[in-house]
Amino acid sequence: MNQRDLNQGRPSRIEGDIRATNDHKYSTYSGNKALMLEEPLIFEAGSLDKSGVDIDVITPDINRLGGLERNQTIGLPGLSESETVRHYTRLSRQNYAIDLGLFPLGSCTMKHNPRLNEKMARIAGFADIHPMQPISTVQGALELIDELAHWLKKLTGMPAVAMSPKAGAHGELCGILAIRAALEARGDAREVILVPESAHGTNPATAAFAGYRVEEIPATEGGRVDVAALEERLGPDVAGVMITNPNTCGLFEPDMRKISDLVHAAGGLVYCDGANFNAIVGRVRPGDLGIDAMHINLHKTFSTPHGGGGPGSGPVVLSEALAPYAPLPFVTKSKDYFTLIEEEQSTAVAGDTFGRMTAFHGQMGMFTRALSYIMSHGADGLKQVSEDAVLNANYILRSMDDVLDAPFGHSGPCMHEALFSDKGLADGFSTIDISKGLIDEGYHPMTMYFPLVVHGAMLVEPTETESKDAVDAFIGSFRNVVQKAIDGDNNLLQAPHFAPRARLDETSAARRPILVWNEPETAQAAE
Amino acid sequence: MRYLPLSDQDRGQMLAKIGVQSIDDLFIDVPEKARLSGTIHDLPNRASEMAVERHFKALAAKNIVAGEVPFFIGAGAYRHHVPASVDHIIQRGEFLTAYTPYQPEIAQGTLQMLFEFQTQVARMLGTDVANASMYDGSTACWEAISMARRITKKKKAILSSRVHPHYVSVAKTMARFTGDMVETSLPTLDRVADIERELLESIDDDTSCVVVQYPDILGNINDLTKIAHKAQQHKALLIAVVTEPVAMGAIKSPGEMGADIVVGEGQSIGVGLQFGGPYVGLFGCKAKYVRQMPGRLCGETVDADGKRGFVLTLSTREQHIRRDKATSNICTNSGLCALAFSVHMTLLGEKGLRDLAMVNHTKAVKAADRLTSIEGVEMVTGNFFNEFTLKLPTDARAIVQLLADQHILGGVSLGRLYPDSDGLDNGLVVAVTETVLDEDIETFANALEAIMSGDLS
């Protein structure tokens, strides 16, 4: 395939040293390059007496601050509204986002965020209510939480759900604490949680955070949990396992039911990491596989926006065995009246709860968005979601596996993400170069160097909200970049060439951390 | 389905390329028993935008909207006016639909914003550094306690009786599993209670940290200097919790008074009430402890062309590198809420924050004077910022409900916050922000007077 074919459907550019376009002799006074605009920090642009908010100042005759007035300068510059809007708009244009294009970040499920969900979350009856309002004044909010809970239970085939966890890792913590509380309640304290070596880093970190010792279970050559090794390790000291299904190699664990049965037989409990639920939603209920707890990332499967790194939301579905230990608070219903079980009823009503994980009741703003998404799709639409997600991923797998090593590609289809390794790239070329090359092609790179069980891993998750044209265009770019890495095209080592910044020096950032802005020393000396 | 762009023709072509007959062939790894035929029972199918909107509006109508009634609720979440441009900016797709900035060359917008946020937070709290945010104030508080254990290698945390009870609950829940000791007690309605002395006396060589809230759950503001000093003598850390960051425009920061770690709930600035979440946890500390911090950190660096740029840094503390040895299991921050906070803070600036704080304080003083002019209502709080606690002659829970029945949201009863405790039932925590009008104070006071005199008409 020649260069022109690889660029099919995309503008071609001048052949030759790409870097030369960056080092073009023509320069500007501003440092800007047309629509690529540089923007100073607010600390450089703003001033302490400027404000974008008009406030009618009033002061009390006698203040009650007890002599604790803040007299020293705080150092918070302000900007007018016009300057503020421009500052952040200019910053925003230095970001890649789903709204700009395909975002194939494996295990992150970067799908389209429907705007209806934003509108629903902003209805005053949800956005402008206080978590400590009397229960009689928030019946609609509790009903909404209850409705979302109903959907999550039905979709997973599980009898209970804890809604308060604030994010995926917080949900993991919830599940592991429930397991620990259940084991302690039966007087059977255990010490070890088993985690496959391919697991997300949050799994071992969570188990350790909850006071467990973590031991790793190896993967088979086919990228699945080594069931024999797991079985051998099970014993009276093992509290449970944390298994991601579909797993981080993008594969379904066909022996999940067997794993659950083995763990239960050994007296342990089964935590399932639901990060990849998008691959099976509407088609498979994890409850049918014998699990005891699973968190659901509402910001993945149910499309609440990632927001540049949160907020997330991580409700946890629970089995009958764990339901009594669910955290406070939770919603109950009797005769069409909803009640929030908080600490006050804890002994009488909440039974064996392991306690409270966060102030208030969870990520309400994410519940509204997720329910809006779920209702919009319905049972039939959600089934289509997982099917199209899996279809798009397999299409990429089979459109790439002639040029890029797919370590588990021979064993059959993948789920919602396709995994490749850096095997076969020219000497000196690695996954990071493919990533940076994709940036120049106008894409956010795939997840790189994860899972750890594959050398130079590239995990590609297109999601179901991409059209065939969009996926084809991405494949064209991906193949183009991979070919450069196979051919040893040195220009790729300097990529990205066209981004707002070239590769950043992360080593010196970590060695001498600059985490807050300080007045330049020269300016201080001049004062 | 309006969000799914593949057509049946596309699907057919793609299946052919993959080399399978049907979509079911891609799910062959799922054991037959677990495969569902058709859609899940008892769940409705897809709905139009119009239908979804109708459903949501019907649910929302069952709630009383804070902004439509006299509103005096605080206790960890505060209703402030958020300028229109904040919501506009956080809805820009480049912020809203971006991911964690792991590819810094195409995430400088988010990264520069986080660097600005960290600087704003550190300056407000009076700390050397701050991170890129946590889930919320309560989880940030536990993370601080856990960090103090790592630094001091001691396990006893002393929590002031006036730390938000939900924060105390979170700490107790976690401590039960981690083996930390959490020592705390209940607050009292005794105005002259000297909790500073109690705290000073409880600090010993086994103490890893002392946690105080400022302003505290009853609204009090107290100097932290002596506690900081005593903690230092015993090689313990002082952790200060700020649930109302607008106060930082009026009163000394905890950092100025010697706190080692300052955590907070940032909701008050830029983020709406939203029934409790998502909010944004603030986390600042002294520079020497930075490598023990939880959560994401953004740092300044340069790119290959020598241009200033920003990256996530010190990630060797984090779970994706350190796994079970990480400082925390936290993976996400509260990015979009941090953006809202930072935009609002930029709009306010130092002058705006100070003015806003003074308006809050002035209105609170006015409300306090009016409410305590009612016979039988006593002030429990000493010095305060925009929140104070009243002692009513009867159970405040019932009174709060009677007020709510008249569409007045008149604070949070201590009976709800401390259900199992004696002697607190008559306490009512009242918050007053710039959104409260003079006539709201009058309406509230008149209704309270009427209820207390038994005249409910």
Image (tube, coloured by chain):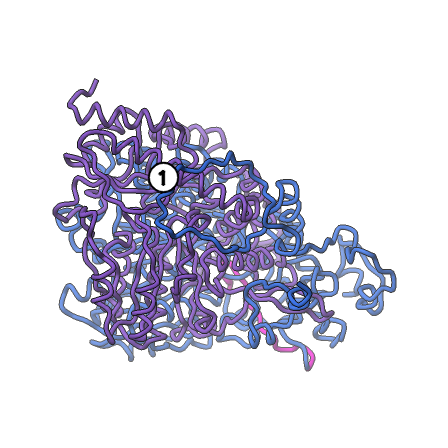
Chain colours: A blue, B purple
**B63 to the left or right of A487:** left
Residue in front for this viewpoint, A256 or B146: B146
Instruction: Give the main secondary structure of the magenta stretch.
Output: loop
Q: Residue at x 64, y 72 (%)?
A: A505
Q: Report the number of discs.
A: 1
Local secondary structure at mark 1: loop
Residue B24, image x and y in percent?
A: 47, 54
Quadrant of the image occupied by residue A260: bottom left
Where B27 falls versus A427 (above or below)? above
Residue found at the very far right of the displayed protein: A25
Which residue is rendered at x = 23% and y = 77% of the image? A235
Residue A155 lies left or right of residue A47; in this view the side is left
Give the residue number, with chain letter if any, for mark 1.
B43
Q: Which residue range is magenta in the image?
A: A413-427
Q: What residue type is labelled 1?
A: Leu
Outermost residue on the top side: it is: B457
Q: Quadrant of the C terminus of chain B?
A: top left
In x, y percent, where is residue A484? 73, 71
